[in-house]
Image (cartoon, grey):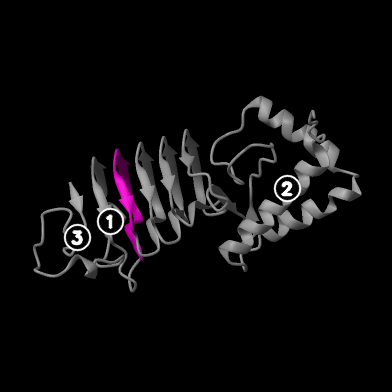
Amino acid sequence: MYFTSYKDDSYGGDTNSNPATNLAKGNWKEIQIESGGSATLTWAVIRYGGYEYGSTADIWVTGGSLTLSNSDLSYGYTYGLLQESGSTAVSDSTIHDNTNYGINGYGGTLDLTGNTFVNNYYPVYVNVAAVTNFTHSNNSAATKVSEGTIFFEDDGRPCFAFNPGIGIGAAFMSIKPSPPEIERSRDLGKRVVGTEDLDSVCRLLVQSYDTGQDALRHFLAAWMALEVSVTKNSPPMKTSS
């Protein structure tokens, strides 16, 4: 099942006799599930939606119920999915190449299971003050500094789940850490506390969370924090001549 732009020649061929270069995010509006409505989509491809004067998302849930599974949700003008109220369950799907958040949870209930997030600016936004029940398991995101699950307080402050374990490719976690990971994080935290040399790590991490900066500055601040942390906490490598 395909929901895409009529300019998308990759499905159904060239139906409008126009070059594929006219294809763009926001070519059509969205699938909207309103209060009292419900939709179950399986093995669906939904992309290039989110007309800029509408929800700016491929799918917009405003009070109804959505079940999406084994599907491709991509190239939304701003979001792949925007939920303002109602209930949504997304499983075993790929959410990719959406301009801002892959999924924007701003109300209702939301369940994410076994999904893969790739090349979204941020995979998931969840307003913890407005979403009444949020459950998630076995989701994954590409290893980019900007990729991961981000929770926001009702006053707009971001609550990042940061994993300082050395060797982890992503700065933010979208899955529950294992007991060994928690223990390593606690151990590193004990070494950071009270060590003046590592004050710069905390300052750099704060900078990397500043939403007023561009993506490059986010990355550089997080990378420098990691580099300083490794340098201060790891013994020098010994080489033999």
- Report crowding for label 2: few under 14, some 14 to 19, many 20 or more residues within 10 A (C-alpha): few
Q: Which residue is mark 3?
A: 8
Q: Position of 223 compared to 13: left or right?
A: right
Whether 58 is among the magenta residues is yes
Amino acid at pointer 1 = Arg
- Report crowding for label 3: few under 14, some 14 to 19, many 20 or more residues within 10 A (C-alpha): many
CA distance for labels 2 and 3: 44 Å
Task: Inspect this view and state whether residue 155 appears.
Answer: no
Q: Nearer the viewer, residue 25 or 49?
A: 25
User: Which residue is pictured at 52% across the width and 54% down the height?
Assistant: 130
Whether 4 is among the magenta residues is no
Q: Which residue is mark 1?
A: 47
User: Which residue is pictured at 85% across the width and 38% down the height?
Assistant: 191
Quarter of image, res 78: bottom left
Q: Which mark is residue 70?
A: none
- Tell me the SS state at disc 1: strand
CB within 8 Å, label 2 to label 3: no
Q: What residue range appears in magenta?
A: 56-75
